[in-house]
Image (tube, coloured by chain):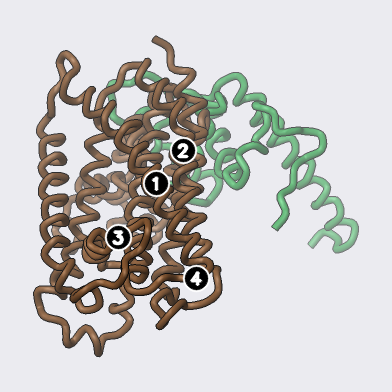
Amino acid sequence: MSRLGLSSQQRAGLLLRCYSGPWRARYGAEFTELLIEDMTERPRSLSRSANVLATAVISRLRVLVPGAYALDPETEARAAIGALISATGLALALSAALWAQLGTAWSWSAPDGGATAGLVLLSVGLGFLAIWSVAGLALPMLHSLLLRPGGGLGPAQRWCACTVIAGSGLLVLGARHFANSWPGTGGPHGHGSVILPPGLAAFGWAATMWLSSYWSHPTALVHFPAAELMWMVLSPLALGAVLVAGRCLLVSASRSPAQLRSQARLSLLGPAGIFLVLAGAMSWVVGEGAGPRGLFQVGTLDDAATAGLGVAWVVAVLAAQGARRAGLAVGD
Amino acid sequence: MTRTSRKSDPATPESLDALGRYAGPATLILSSLAGGSKHGYALTKDIESFAGMRLAPGTLYEALSRLEAQGLIEAVESSDRRRPYRLTGVGAVALRSQLAHQRRVAEAGLRRLAAEWGAR
């Protein structure tokens, strides 16, 4: 038993969760046995945990490379599509937050230079990603889950579906509630922008307040009502739960070889969409000028979000290439 | 840091160069499996006994999975959850080549030591 009261079996299980699904399916049982025997000999070892975590990260990236592990093409393709879903979810969340910030600022005053190009590219990229996510990823998998013979949701999938519905509902209701009463977004809006209605911008702003410069100003936060502070903590948790549960739901859907090949062919659209939003974020972040009244000032969190988009794009490129190579090799 | 490779042994499937930083652990694993098939923990203990170093579980399985993907080792069917691995023919060729190279390096180093520093 560990200090937390966990048995070796439970601790080994937790460490194993760090590896990707396909890797666990192939090596999980035997690796767990090795960990348990190692824990019997060395009950506490920080270096063992660090080693497992480091190699788990390596394996999560390597599983995207066809032939890197002794896995069949279908397993490789499913792993790559799973990684593509993760990268797309991350890109959607980050780009929506940046887009909402720019849109809200624009509803008060028109920007100049990089922020204009940034908002246009972010809008086009977000639309592209949203359509591709629904049409290329979600609908085919939901069709498999619900309509195929022998389909239907298992217990874990039902739990994921409930989490997605509850989390999305909470985000929508909370963002609707706070959109027009938030300091900085409330009151009569300005002239609005050509491509983003002020109401929609305020909704996006309230839904993505976790990416806010208010975190850097504790003196301002002190004056916020408790309900709004709670929303700033709760909304990212709800968003995270929706993304993780949504990914689990989509990845666990069974797909026919034909569906897998079709998704593999379309997979390159994912990195293309992420590239558009990344280009939009970059044109704002590296562009000069904070705009009128400093409304378009770039903060550290915006830099971090843009870096996150960069990481999502690299993972999506690797995953799409892996999905194409492995998916097109899947036979009937 | 620069990566080195042997001019005489390009990174073919029979070479361990393709394993990069896992070539060292891979040599230890193949040397252990040269004495018979073993599962993960038995490999750890055997390597510890003949090489005096313990491969961490993550490193061991990353190297094992790479060796398996290259066809240098293969899993043995087993009802036990602790699946054993054994050396393949290609793996034996790769190990022989790797050890011969290491022996050439060791002999050259020992010769130079003896010439310059004497036998101490």
Q: What residue is disc 1 on?
A: A87
Quote the CA–CA distance across marks 1 and 4: 30 Å
Residue that mark 4 sits on: A112
Q: Decide: marks 1, 2 in contact (CB < 8 A)?
A: yes
Chain identifier matching the brown colour in the rendered picture: A
The three-letter amino acid code for the residue at tag 2 is Ala
Estimate the spatial distance between the alpha carbons at disc 2 and disc 4, rounded to whole Å.
36 Å
Residue A235: image x %, image y %?
19, 62
Q: Which of A110 and B23 is in front in this view?
A: A110
Q: Can residue A287 be seen in this view?
A: yes
Quarter of the image where one finds residue A257: top left
**Marks 1 and 4 share the same chain:** yes
Which structural element holds mark 1? helix
> Of callouts 3 and 4, which one flags the residue occurring earlier in the amino acid sequence?
3
Q: Residue at x 45, y 62 (%)?
A: A306
Location of residue A153 in the rendering, given as x and y in whole percent from the top left corner: 13, 28
| Label at residue A319 | 2
- Dot 3, crowdedness within 10 Å: few (<14), some or many (≥20)? few
Q: Which mark is residue A44?
A: 3
- Label 4 is found on which chain of the structure? A
Q: Residues at marks 2 and 3, common chain?
A: yes
Give the answer, above or below, for where A250 lies relative to A174.
above
Depth check: A144 or A19 in front?
A144
Q: Earlier in the sequence, mark 1 or mark 3?
A: 3
Amino acid found under the numbered disc labelled 1: Ala
Q: Pointer 1 and pointer 4: residues touching (CB < 8 Å)?
A: no
Q: Quick one: label 4, few (<14), some, or many (20+) residues within 10 Å?
A: some
Mark toward the start of the polypeptide (2 vs 4): 4
Q: Residue at x 51, y 55 (%)?
A: A279
Amino acid type, callout 4: Asp
